[in-house]
Image (cartoon, rainbow, N blue to C red):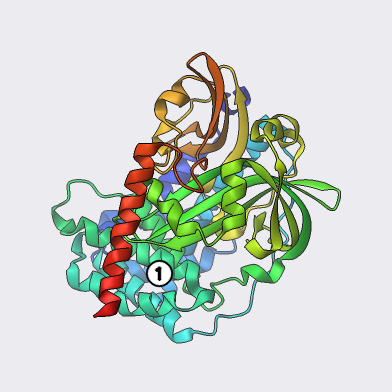
Amino acid sequence: MLALLDGTDPGLTEALDVVAAVDDGLVHGFARVDEDRAAALAALAGAFAGSPLRDRIAEAVDKVAAGSIADEHLLALAAARVAVFGAVHDALLARVDSALSRTRAPWQGQPGPAAGAANLLAGSRSWLRELAITGWRGVDHDLVTASSQVIEATLADPELRRLAVLLDGLAAELRAASPIATLERLPVRRWADLWSRALLLAQDGGRAGRAADAETVSGRLLVLGVDVHEHSTAVQVQVHGVLEAGGVTRLVRTSVTAGKVDTIVGPAIWGLLQGFPVLMTALAERRSLDLTDVPLLASGDLIWHDTRAKAGEPADPFATARVLLPGALAPAVPPLDRHPARIAEPVFVEGDSAVPLDATRLPACGPLTADLVAGASACIGLLRWDAGKWTVQPIAVQATVKKKTVAVHTADWALGPTDAKAAKAAGDAVQVLRERAGRLLRK
């Protein structure tokens, strides 16, 4: 991976700077565009002078600067922002593939049918438009609360779940940050990322028919490790692995998600995922998984069906990483997922790593700790790019503990903590909530 650190990609800094026009507009609101912000937006339009988006972005910039803002103009600005980050993502991923000698499949996904819940999409766009016109500094309790009804309805539609969870997360962050006008610093780029992605997903056809391009596969899944994405209202366990199917060895992911409340944290979250016993058993016991007719998307995501999987023989993730990971075919990246922050490439590191290990992303639900990472002799991790530098997020390590070499994984507690203190804390949190829910139901 040393090649990752050789030089920089020309134009990368300039490309990231140009999206600041949209980000700054979202901070102060597009209803208040002064001369400096209008000039920054004009520079953004200039960056697309040679692209198919040229006319639409130029028109949007002119209309926004003149104070005449329509949905189509905000969509053009969001699309421009997503396109710039997509170009940066592609340049960085090409560097990764070159450094790792990794082969990547071309994108072959097809657009899906238009979304049927037009009223929910329109309601989502309306709230996102109000955010853009008002700006983060002007967001108050009433504006955040205005999203509640449409988010609740959108969450109830499985086809719009991605949009719904995104809107729910954005609303929760804005609510938690209120009063925003008094904050010294804002997560400007993060909120702009969420806003622009949500606006594209809220268009007719925005759900993109992700299952439309799925193929059905049967074979053996060898787990490399688990990344845990946790929010106050939801948790997702994303499993990275190598799939042997149809004579091809591929890098794949699969995810399972559960709703939660903010009092369920740490090891207690595994109790929310016991509706997937086959997957949880394989993770905790480090077993392979035998799959039958499981849908696989062009993005490399397996749509998990616990009933179509069986826990197989014990399989050491470190052996998988050493032997199979180097030659596995990497999946293509869907258009809306092309963003530098979403790069998470499985890698195996042994001995001293040229790319630093980042222990700040370790989830609180597993036994993997910063001390274990610091003393690791080998690591399975996710290669990431953040704030202009490469890091590896550990998801499993080999380290020496009490003169013995041990392997520790983020999902070792998938069937419940093996540490007595952690097990008691996890059980207490879930038990208390179950008792409260039972009392409420009896009333």
The correct choice, above or below, for 118 with respect to 203 in the image is below
The residue sitting at 63% across, 53% down in the picture is 333
User: In the rendering, at what x and y percent does residue 395 appear?
Assistant: 53, 37
Q: For the point 22% across and 46% down, which residue is it?
A: 185
Q: Is residue 443 above or below residue 15?
A: below
- When asked about the image quadrant of residue 419, the answer is top left
Q: Is 87 on the left or on the right of 319, as rendered?
A: left
Residue 38 in view here: no
The three-letter code of the residue at mark 1 reads Leu
Q: Secondary structure at mark 1?
A: helix
Quarter where residue 124 is shown: bottom left
Quadrant where the image shows the N terminus = top right
Other residues around mark 1 within 10 Å, as few (<14) / some (14–19) / many (≥20): many
Front in this rendered view, residue 356 or 282 = 282
What residue does disc 1 label? 74
Q: Please give the name of the residue rendered at 29% of the width and 55% of the height, measured from the top-left corner.
A: 263
